[in-house]
Image (tube, rainbow, N blue to C red):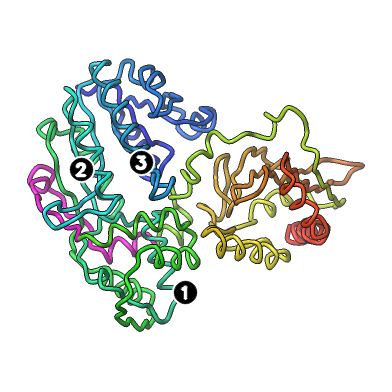
């Protein structure tokens, strides 16, 4: 009998899909997160919530109490190519030690697929291998699953491929685009993660997992183009600098350059399954690449994207200072409002449509200008999109804002996650006033630096135009 299960990385793309699957199958689950436990209690009311950081071992020791099996789904890819490897190794070392002290029965780890015999691995794939080796140094048996590109609605790899195909008619193909890959659908990854938990013979073993097809990266783009019925011309180029292509891709996709570079660096290696014993132990038919992308597109069309890469980006978002945690109201505030006879429900519904595909209504071009500047200078922007087009909840991403507070028909508070010389919030509120509704928008900005203050006053002349137009359009669309 399997006892209580700990899922780390539960706020990320894979963990966020694994937790509900385990709960649906009747398991006792404790999820480990770094942020406020309240939002995760609302999301998974049947799960226990533990607040801990894998890089601080004391919190891990508390999280491990009473645990039978632990999933290790932690990675620090969002930190960028220079920092994530050291952070991941430290987290794995702490995790191994705390698991051994707690006497848990198993660790299940999802790592990266890469053949060490085929040459020098990328930093990303080498880090995944080092984490696996670190976990195995302890006395707790480790089950290791190694996957290549994961394809699913909301995955970073899928969104990069999708946006490149949708936005380009001509795509340059460097030499490494001819390397082979064995992509796997997110549905099948979750099947394997649950399957090895329920199959004791997988304990202490390592397995390669992949989809039905082995394709070059060029072919992956071509297949998506065929599905979208879009003609694209591919031409070979001798220039193969990964950093350049990652930066270029970040200008055309919602995924920032720091993540894109780490993912694209892995394209230098062929990533195909060498050991397929897992098919005999867990015999099910994996999806083909084409089936996986059609499934991902269908989930998007149905507005059923359950997790997204941006849920865990930027890496410290869960620890970010909240507006109510400031010692005093920020010195820099602008406030605009209007009175309307429309009801609160209709107004709030309109507020909740901002961002993503809807954009920012009549103020959209100014947000796009700001995003363009950030993308050119920093490899990020305001076009990160949103997970759901029809609903919102606390911690959801709306472009380069994150929902800090959500009170239906009353208040929506967004915290800025774009690059700023200070901290910023955007608040929408609805109150009753004289038999009508007062629709308000307030921008809060907190800074101590001279550059931050200069930035505020440079933007100030545009605030009236942006915010007044925005609330007027919200009211009109209600």
In this rendering, the label closer to the viewer, 3 or 1 = 3
Q: Quadrant of residue 204?
A: top left
Q: Which residue is mark 2?
A: 145
What residue is drawn where x is 38% and y is 66%? Answer: 161
Q: Which residue is mark 3?
A: 75
Q: Does residue 414 appear left or right of residue 27 in this picture?
A: right
Distance in Å between CA atoms under marks 3 and 1: 30 Å
Distance in Å between CA atoms under marks 1 and 2: 34 Å
Query: At numbered mark 1, what does the secondary structure look like: helix, strand or loop?
Result: helix
Query: At numbered mark 2, what does the secondary structure look like: helix, strand or loop?
Result: strand
Q: Does residue 301 appear left or right of residue 450 in this picture?
A: left
Q: Does residue 99 appear left or right of residue 335 in this picture?
A: left
Please provide the residue range marked out in magenta.
Answer: 270-296
Q: For this rendering, which residue is in front, 259 or 102?
A: 259
| Neighbourhood count class around disc 3 (C-alpha, 10 Å): few under 14, some 14–19, many 20 upward | many
Q: Which residue is mark 1?
A: 167
In which quadrant of the rendered image does the C terminus lie?
bottom right
Tell me residue 215's x, y (percent).
21, 67
What residue is drawn where x is 67% and y is 40%? Answer: 408
């Amino acid at each position: 009998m399997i006892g209580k299960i700990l899922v780390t990385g539960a706020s990320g793309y894979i963990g966020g899909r694994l937790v509900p699957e385990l709960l649906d199958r009747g398991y006792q689950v404790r999820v480990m997160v770094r942020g406020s436990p309240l939002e995760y209690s609302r999301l998974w009311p049947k799960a226990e919530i533990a607040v801990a950081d894998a890089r601080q071992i004391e919190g891990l020791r508390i999280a491990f109490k009473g645990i039978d099996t632990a999933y290790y789904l932690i990675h620090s890819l969002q930190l960028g190519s220079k920092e994530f490897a050291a952070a991941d190794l430290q987290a794995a070392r702490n995790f191994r030690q705390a698991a051994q002290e707690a006497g848990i029965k198993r660790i299940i780890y999802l790592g990266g697929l890469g053949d060490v015999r085929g040459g020098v691995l990328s930093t990303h794939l080498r880090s995944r291998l080092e984490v696996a080796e670190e976990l195995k140094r302890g006395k707790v048996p480790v089950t290791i699953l190694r996957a290549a590109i994961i394809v699913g609605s909301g995955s970073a790899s899928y969104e990069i491929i999708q946006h490149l195909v949708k936005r380009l008619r001509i795509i340059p193909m460097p030499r490494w685009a001819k390397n082979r890959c064995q992509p796997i659908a997110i549905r099948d990854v979750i099947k394997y993660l649950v399957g090895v938990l329920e199959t004791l013979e997988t304990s202490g073993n390592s397995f390669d997992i992949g989809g039905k097809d082995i394709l070059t990266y060029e072919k992956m783009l071509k297949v998506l183009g065929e599905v979208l019925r879009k003609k694209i011309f591919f031409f070979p180029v001798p220039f193969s600098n990964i950093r350049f292509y990652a930066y270029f891709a970040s200008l055309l996709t919602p995924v920032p350059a720091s993540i894109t570079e780490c993912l694209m660096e892995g394209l230098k290696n062929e990533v195909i399954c060498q050991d397929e014993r897992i098919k005999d132990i867990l015999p099910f038919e994996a999806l083909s690449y084409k089936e996986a992308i059609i499934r991902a597109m269908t989930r998007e069309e149905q507005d059923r994207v359950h997790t997204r890469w941006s849920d865990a980006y930027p890496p410290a978002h869960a620890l970010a200072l909240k507006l109510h945690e400031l010692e005093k109201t920020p010195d820099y505030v602008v406030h605009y409002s209007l009175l309307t006879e429309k009801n609160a429900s209709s107004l709030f519904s309109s507020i909740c449509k901002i961002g993503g595909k809807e954009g920012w209504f009549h103020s959209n071009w100014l947000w796009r200008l700001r995003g363009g500047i950030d993308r050119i200078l920093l490899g990020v922007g305001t076009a990160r999109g949103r997970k759901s087009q029809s609903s919102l909840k606390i911690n959801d991403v709306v472009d380069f804002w994150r929902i800090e507070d959500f009170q239906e028909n009353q208040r929506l508070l967004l915290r800025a996650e774009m690059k700023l010389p200070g901290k910023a919030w955007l608040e929408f509120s609805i109150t009753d006033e004289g038999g009508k509704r007062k629709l308000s928008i307030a921008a809060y900005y907190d800074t101590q630096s001279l550059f931050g203050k200069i930035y505020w006053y440079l933007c100030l002349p545009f605030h009236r135009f942006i915010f007044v137009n925005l609330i007027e359009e919200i009211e009109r669309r209600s």
